[in-house]
Image: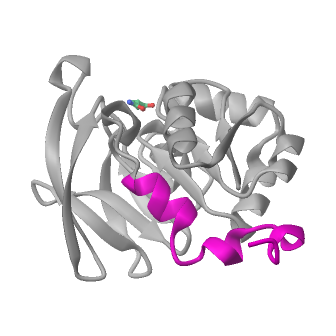
Amino acid sequence: MKVGVLALQGDFDKHCRILNNLGIIPQNIRYPNQLEQVEGLIIPGGESTTMSDLINRAMFYEPIRNFSKSFPVLGTCAGLIMMAKKVLDEKINPLALLDITVERNAYGSQIHSFTHNLGIEIKGQKRSVPATFIRAPKIYAVHPAVEILSKYNQEYVAVRQGKHVGLAFHPELDNVSFFHELTFMGNNFKNNMRKKDRNVT
Ligand code: GLN
């Protein structure tokens, strides 16, 4: 399986390492037509104002939105902001892949960064993973179709809607592969594969 990492801006390299460890082939995505070669996409952390601008200039909006109808997308921090339906900042033109409203930088500035062990419960299975928050966004409103995977101090910090997962933190900085596995190797794995490859495994 090949998963793309949007490599316009931000910390895309660390995601590639996590994918490699899971036996998934990472591919940096710089042009919309490269989406045809992958079966999943990561939108990394970085600076969402710059990312929004570059997504617009590189004409990625419709290609990513079309891609997301068939394949899973994982967004971390600025990536989550880009995946939201609504962002409380007019500089951002989000992709609307997750039915949520977010506020940028809502946990404070860079010096307020922190790492916290988050509890996660999926299908009755509990686990705890370290999560690093850096100028992280807050998720304020979620549609009932959005599943809350984890909270920090009553705030939603990890959500899933259909095949897409959005995180306010950076699992790649703590070498946590759980969310990559969940997004790209979960129950829907076979359905996520491109048709031509489906009967290979
Ligand atoms: N605050 C940044 C933004 O709005 C996101 C920070 C991050 O990705 N760590 O884009």
| Camera-side residue of 91 and 33 | 33
Residue 124 against residue 36 in the figure, above or below? below
127 vs 70, left or right, is: left
Locate residue 126: give its quadrant: bottom left
Residue 194 position, x and y percent, is 81, 67
Residue at the image point whose x is 83% and y is 68% from the top = 197
Above or below, 24 against 199 in this view is: above
Residue 71: image location, x then y, percent: 69, 64
Image quadrant holding the C terminus, namely bottom right
- Please indicate whether residue 118 sits to the left or right of residue 59 in the image: left
**Residue in the foreground of this view, choosing between 38 and 77:** 38
Residue 103 shown in magenta: no
Magenta segment boundaries in residue numbering: 178-201
Q: Quadrant of residue 68?
A: bottom right
| Residue drawn at (67%, 75%) of the image | 190
Task: State the quadrant of the N terminus.
Answer: bottom right
Name the foreground residue: 24 vs 88: 24
Residue, far left: 153
* Helix, strand or loop for the magenta stretch, by majority: helix
Q: In the image, is residue 36 above or below residue 148?
A: above
Q: Is residue 188 magenta?
A: yes
Look at 32% across and 41% down and name the residue there. 169
Q: Position of residue 79 (x, y in %)?
A: 51, 42
Q: Pick out the residue farthest to the top.
A: 111
**Relative to 102, is 8 above or below?**
above
| Furthest-front residue in this view | 201
Q: How many marks?
A: 0
Q: Which quadrant of the picture is home to ligand 1?
A: top left
